[in-house]
Amino acid sequence: MSRSTDPIDTYLLRVLVALVAERSVSRTAARMNQTQPAISTALRRLRELFGDPILVRERSGMVPTERALQLRDRARDALAEIDRMLSGPERFDPYASTSSFHIALPDYLAAQFLVDATARFRTEAPQARLVVHALSSTYDYERALAQGELDIVIGNWPQPPERLHLSLLLEDALVCLMSARNPLAADGPLTLECYLQAQHLVPTPLTQAQRGVVETHLATLRRTRDARMTVPYFALAPHLLVGTDLVFTTARHFAEQFVRTLPLVAVPAPPGFPRMRFYQLWHERSQHQAGHRWLRGLLASVAAGLATPTS
């Protein structure tokens, strides 16, 4: 519909709000710096558009109709939204914000990531709320992002959905976590053949639609590993390696926290294995929101602090 044929515009909405507040054509004209004939003309148009007198005369003077009061509330909301649209780029003050932010992430990120992110979040946005959701193979995170139930998803799928925005958070080397008593821990560099002959502890995929990083790489070589045990929780896997001959392949930053606390070692993955890439994903609906941009920047900064040397 063209502007010339629009039945109502912001001017009429503002006249409506002023008329209900002032209950007088003359006072409305003075308030809006308009002539009385101009406001009378606007009132006539409002009456025609809504089929309602808007103002009626009583002994005490002009009073708004019930319909006018309802229209006034809706007009205020509409005008406030229009004013926000025309006020320029959205401003966001994290320190004063009381917003709630929702992120979903797998447990194969080192706990230190969430520790650091929480500390930064509490410092920069002390009145805001952060809700962390768990990812699982049955959780439809794309729907949750599209419907606003989630703000950001952190993942490392080899082929992330093209429909979502993406930025790299962290790139890390793959290592093979194993018991310090595992013979492979003392045999020097781990070759592909030794890796394939070992018995492996593997995680349950977080999505049925995609293979993990290791399976994707081995598929390009037309090889498979011997998965002797499957677990749904990354954080549980290192504890199951103690006293066994199982091997768990994961990112270096995840493995190092357990090497410091358990009798485990982290051996570099065989030559040619890809690096693990973690990224944050978000929907187009959040692309330009100032608060969302702040959260993405915070997570990126925290991840940069976990990055390990590429050499």
Image: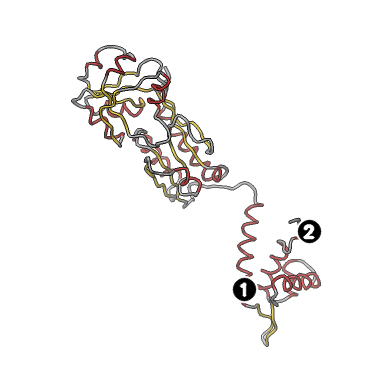
From the viewer's side, name the closer residue of 124 and 145: 145
Picture coordinates of residue 195 (x, y %)?
Answer: 31, 18
Q: Callout 2 environment at 10 Å: few (<14), some (14 to 19), or many (20+)?
A: few
Q: Is disc 1 surrounded by few (<14), some (14 to 19) or many (20+) residues within 10 Å? A: some
* Residue 85 higher or lower than 288, as above or below: below
Identify residue type, mark 1: Leu
Residue type of the residue flagged with mark 2: Ser
Name the element at disc 1.
helix
- The residue located at (64%, 65%) in the rendering is 75
From the viewer's perspective, is 130 left or right of 165?
A: left
For label 1, the residue is: 69
Identity of the residue drawn at 59% across and 48% down: 90
Residue 25 in the image: above or below residue 203: below
Give percent across and percent down for residue 281.
Answer: 48, 38
Seen as rendered, the residue at the extreme top is 188
Whichever of callouts 2 and 1 sits on the residue coming sooner in the sequence is 2
Left or right: 69 in relation to 102: right
Give the camera-side residue of 291 and 133: 133
Report whether residue 29 is seen. no
Which quarter of the rendered picture does the C terminus lie within?
top left
Outermost residue, front side:
222
Question: Furthest residue to the left?
Answer: 243
Inspect this view and state whether residue 231 appears: yes
Residue 101 locus on image (x, y percent): 45, 47
Q: Label for residue 4?
A: 2
Q: Against 24, is 59 above or below?
A: below
- Which mark is in front, 2 or 1? 2
Position of residue 162 measured from the top left corner of the image (x, y, whole percent): 53, 35
Q: Which quarter of the image is occupied by the N terminus?
A: bottom right
For the residues labelled 2 and 1, the Cα–Cα distance comes to 27 Å
